[in-house]
Amino acid sequence: MTMRVAIISAEAVPYSKTGGLGDVAGALPKALKAVGVDPLLITPCYWQTKGEYLWNIAIDDLWVTWKGRPYHAKAFYSEANGSPTFLIDAPSIFHRDSIYGYTEDYERFAFLSHAALALLRRIGGAPDIVHLNDWHTGFAAVELASRRHGEDYWRRTRTVFSIHNMAYQGGFGIGQLPELGFTSQFARNAFSFNGYASAMKAGLEVSDTLSTVSKRYSQEIQTGEFGYGLDWLTRKRADRLIGITNGVDYEVWNPAADPELPAHFSADDLVGKTDCKKALLEQFKLPVDLDKPVFAIVTRLTVQKGVELIRQCAGDILALGAYFIALGSGEGESERFLQALRDYAPSQVGVYVGYNEKLAHLIEAGADMFLMPSKFEPCGLNQMYSLRYGTVPIVRAVGGLDDTVQNWDAVTQTGNGFKFGPYRADKLIEKIYEAGFAYADKAAWRKIQRNGMSVDNSWENAARNYVDLYEWTLRN
Ligand code: ADP
Ligand code: GLC
């Protein structure tokens, strides 16, 4: 019988996106469908969600018990991500200037969990698996674990909880639990963490099985350095925790057909990449010297992404005579740093502060090197996009970066990028110089690019691994 999997996520492409979670939640259901699973995605309808993606109102009276009262929500239906999706419409809760960043976010996503389960109940036929993602969905893990005992409807449903980022845990006052609909001692114990309530901790504790978005990260979060206070719990549940590296949606990220690009290219014919480089330099009003390498970043500007190391090595990139192009938004200090760098060297530096999907594609295509010196990186998608676009990643050996990038070895001609270990600027600078050196040797550079472009990070593999995880979860 076909396995039915409901995936709940706070963001999903193309409906909403702030980072990789959106990419993953949007693409995984389609990939699951392709390997024979019957998937259903449930995600909020934000003010930012484009109307063209809301195909029709599937349910116009979705009643959710919220703060002790009935709340009247709706659900839109769409398949804009290539598989069945319900979008929870609750404007007073989800319509904000940005998707996250409010003190009451924990309430907003507690609501998502309640609404998602109300929706699943309403449409009938309980799923075999409810696949939860990050702290936003920890509430659903607790609710399902409690209901399973009392309600026949949920008795056979099992939960898988995927950790995309341990650094965000959805903390709030434990006194808020009853208002959110969690009154039992079981729930209190599940959420309780160091005198607070933590939705991440609850998800980790009560879900049937756990996964992370790379193998390396599944080990890292069992250590004090990466566990953010919850490493004791991931160690305790290590026998139920596995790592599955995210895939790349090659329908969206394919240099041979990407509609966002002025020219196309592939591993066999890289001419179009030069046209993209030219277009990229022109877009940033930089002088077009195609011999100089372009180093680039596309990122949330947060501590996680190693912006501190980038700040420390920016001068060395300029000293190489190279270009540096940055697309990012986040911490004000980093945004100001980038703007000041551009003002200092306007003929070498291009900066776009903000979020820009189209530009992200052009940078992936037009740059020569992509920097990701992350402090921690559960998986990371941009290094995988870079590989496919012939843009050589320079990464720190951490999390998914370590699993997906192999250091170039000039003797054996193997490797697809440059990788350093310790979180130190001098180590990154060494790799920047090594990359600059390799770039000057055209044959070597083509080889590194081709090695990267031929890597298969498609969702198909990842989807099969999820199917194994679901089956394992149902057996146990
Ligand atoms: P994270 O989810 O931690 O931010 P990932 O590498 O998994 O990191 O995913 C980041 C995703 O967000 C990528 O698809 C990347 O292209 C996109 N992205 C990040 N910052 C921007 C930006 N300023 N403009 C456009 N896309 C961005
Ligand atoms: C998180 C992580 C990132 C990962 C993404 C998707 O945002 O920071 O490393 O790729 O989730 O799983």
Image (cartoon, helix red, strand yellow):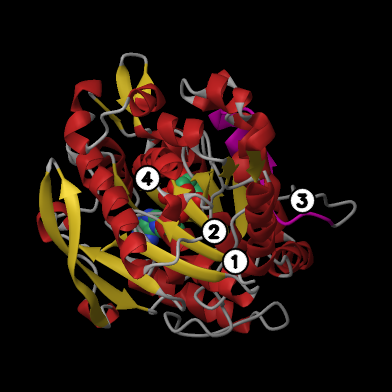
Q: Name the residue at 27% across, 33% down.
A: 182
Instruction: Work out which residue is located at the far top of the displayed protein and give it.
Output: 195
Question: Which residue matches tag 1?
Answer: 3
Q: Secondary structure at mark 1?
A: loop
| Badge 2: residue crowd in 10 Å (few <14, some 14–19, many ≥20) | many
Instruction: Decide which of tag 1 and tag 3 comes sooner along the chain.
Output: 1
Question: Which residue matches tag 4?
Answer: 140
Residue 239 drawn at (x, y percent): 69, 32
Disc 3 from disc 4: Cα separation: 44 Å
Q: Which residues are magenta?
A: 414-429
Determine contact: label 3, label 4, CB under 8 Å: no
Q: Secondary structure at mark 2?
A: loop
Disc 2 from disc 3: Cα separation: 44 Å
- Residue 26 is labelled as none
Disc 4 from disc 1: Cα separation: 20 Å
Determine contact: label 1, label 2, CB under 8 Å: yes
Q: Amino acid at mark 1?
A: Met
Residue 422 magenta-highlighted:
yes
Q: Amino acid at mark 3?
A: Trp
Instruction: Decide which of tag 3 and tag 4 comes sooner along the chain.
Output: 4
Most foreground residue, 64 or 228: 64
